[in-house]
């Protein structure tokens, strides 16, 4: 309707101009090579009008033809794309049916039909080669994917997985880092990077990646603190015998991020003793034991007493002086009294722990006291048998594999990073770790 009104207005305007020019006719003269030519204004303007009309018709025909040709080209492209997409679908169906010959054929069709966009063909071929375990050709496909902006992340991830499969952690990290920098929100990319880095003991790089992940809000602050503290701890262990002072600086950073964590405290005490800071180690040990007594620290007392040139029991009494009634304090004192064959004193201190159902380790300690003091095999056997009904001590247990182990490590014996918890092992672990626990506590 609007177009019709517009054309009508234009025609009316042209008609008015023509009527005006014809009713007000005049002579137009012009000179060419000494000749003067004259023409009526009516004829001149009619000629111009015809020229304008002819140009309009030619332009209309040109643009109409061009539009039809463009429309034809677009329709052809759409048809080719539809065929290409159909080939992709057929290829995926063939892949699902394990008809690899047809899948490859459809992949080649995609390359021809979608000449300017080979991404679908690459995607289909990657799935074909992955299922057929044609890894060398699969690598070439992933390399080609990297050249496509829309598929480079798939290429990075594919190559990362390929190198992980072949245990080439150096190259796996290169592509994992590229994927992380390109798209840090890819699911589990941080965890994958961590697993690669712990395989190569690249703890410095773990610090960098963790900082980046925290800044990009991929991980929480508490996760960042724990992982960085582990990295500092591992670096401190590496430098322990090459630069003890630098090692001490690193373990201090660990303790700042994870205060009172027993494995860190233990290493710090070992480093202080190694650095001949015996008196400070003694004071620090007492401070920590008064606030957070832990059985993993007990082994340090022997080394420290030797360096201080004092009896171990005297050192133990000093360490537990501010929390003598604490269970771990009592156990440490009793163990050392047994070690020194001070049976009467050991029996005196263990009495407070012999309740209705004493713990397993208490029963075993009582068995040692009976063996050392009286040598009564019947009493020893009685306490050893009673130990089987006592509750198990806490140990480091992997929450993934459920396996218990004697000492904490940043990577569990099952190969899992930061997976150990201080807890009572499951019943099945209690049966398999009796001897381990006995050796650990003594």
Image: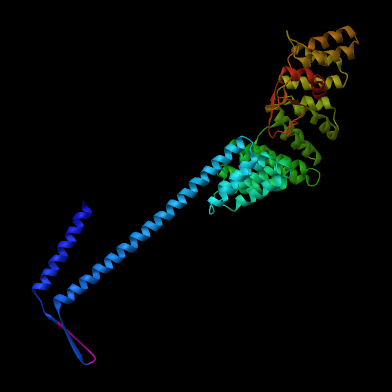
Q: Kindly give the residue lying farthest to the bottom in the view shown.
A: 34
Name the residue at 73% across, 30% down: 286
Identify the magenta region. 28-33
In the rendered image, residue 231, in percent from the top left (x then y), is placed at 69, 41
Name the residue at 24% across, 91% down: 33
Q: Which of 172 and 90 is in front in this view?
A: 90
In the rendered image, residue 379, in percent from the top left (x then y), is placed at 86, 8
In the rendered image, residue 436, in percent from the top left (x then y), is placed at 81, 23
Residue 424 position (above or below residue 205):
above
Asked whether, in this view, residue 75 is left or right of residue 241, the answer is: left
Name the residue at 33% across, 59% down: 64
Q: Confirm whether residue 282 shows in the render.
A: yes
Q: Is residue 74 magenta?
A: no
The secondary structure that most of the magenta stretch takes on is: strand
In which image quadrant can residue 69 be found?
A: bottom left
In the rendered image, residue 234, in percent from the top left (x then y), is placed at 73, 40
């Amino acid at each position: 309707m609007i177009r019709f009104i517009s054309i009508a207005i234009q025609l009316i305007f042209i008609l008015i101009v023509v009527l005006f020019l014809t009713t007000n006719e005049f002579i137009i003269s012009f000179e060419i090579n000494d000749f003067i030519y004259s023409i009526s204004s009516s004829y001149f303007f009619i000629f111009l009008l015809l020229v304008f009309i002819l140009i309009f018709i030619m332009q209309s025909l040109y643009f109409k033809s061009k539009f039809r040709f463009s429309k034809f080209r677009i329709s052809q492209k759409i048809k080719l794309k539809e065929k290409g997409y159909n080939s992709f679908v057929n290829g995926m169906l063939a892949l699902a049916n394990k008809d690899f010959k047809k899948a490859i054929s459809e992949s080649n069709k995609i390359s021809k039909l979608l000449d300017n966009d080979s991404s679908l063909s690459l995607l289909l071929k990657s799935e074909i080669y992955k299922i057929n375990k044609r890894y060398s050709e699969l690598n070439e496909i992933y390399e080609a994917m990297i050249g496509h902006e829309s598929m480079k992340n798939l290429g990075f991830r594919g190559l990362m997985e390929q190198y992980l499969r072949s245990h080439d952690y150096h190259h796996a990290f290169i592509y994992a880092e590229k994927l992380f920098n390109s798209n840090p929100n890819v699911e589990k990319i941080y965890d994958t990077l961590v697993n690669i880095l712990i395989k190569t003991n690249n703890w410095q790089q773990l610090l960098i990646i963790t900082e980046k992940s925290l800044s990009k809000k991929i991980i929480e602050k508490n996760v960042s603190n724990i992982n960085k503290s582990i990295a500092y701890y591992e670096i401190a262990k590496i430098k322990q015998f090459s630069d003890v002072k630098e090692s001490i600086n690193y373990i201090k950073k660990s303790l700042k991020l994870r205060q009172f964590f027993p494995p860190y405290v233990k290493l710090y005490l070992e480093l202080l003793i190694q650095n001949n800071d015996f008196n400070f180690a003694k004071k620090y040990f007492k401070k920590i034991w008064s606030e957070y007594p832990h059985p993993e620290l007990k082994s340090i007392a022997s080394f420290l007493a030797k360096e201080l040139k004092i009896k171990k029991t005297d050192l133990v009494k000093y360490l537990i002086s501010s929390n003598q009634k604490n269970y771990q304090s009592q156990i440490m004192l009793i163990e050392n009294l047994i070690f020194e064959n001070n049976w009467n004193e050991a029996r005196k201190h263990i009495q407070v722990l012999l309740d209705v159902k004493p713990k397993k380790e208490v029963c075993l300690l009582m068995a040692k006291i009976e063996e050392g003091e009286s040598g009564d095999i019947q009493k020893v056997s009685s306490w050893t048998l009673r130990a089987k009904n006592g509750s198990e001590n806490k140990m480091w247990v992997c929450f993934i594999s459920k396996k218990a182990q004697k000492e904490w490590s940043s990577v569990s014996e099952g190969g899992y990073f930061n997976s150990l918890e201080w807890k009572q092992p499951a019943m099945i672990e209690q049966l398999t770790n009796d001897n381990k626990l006995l050796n650990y506590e003594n």
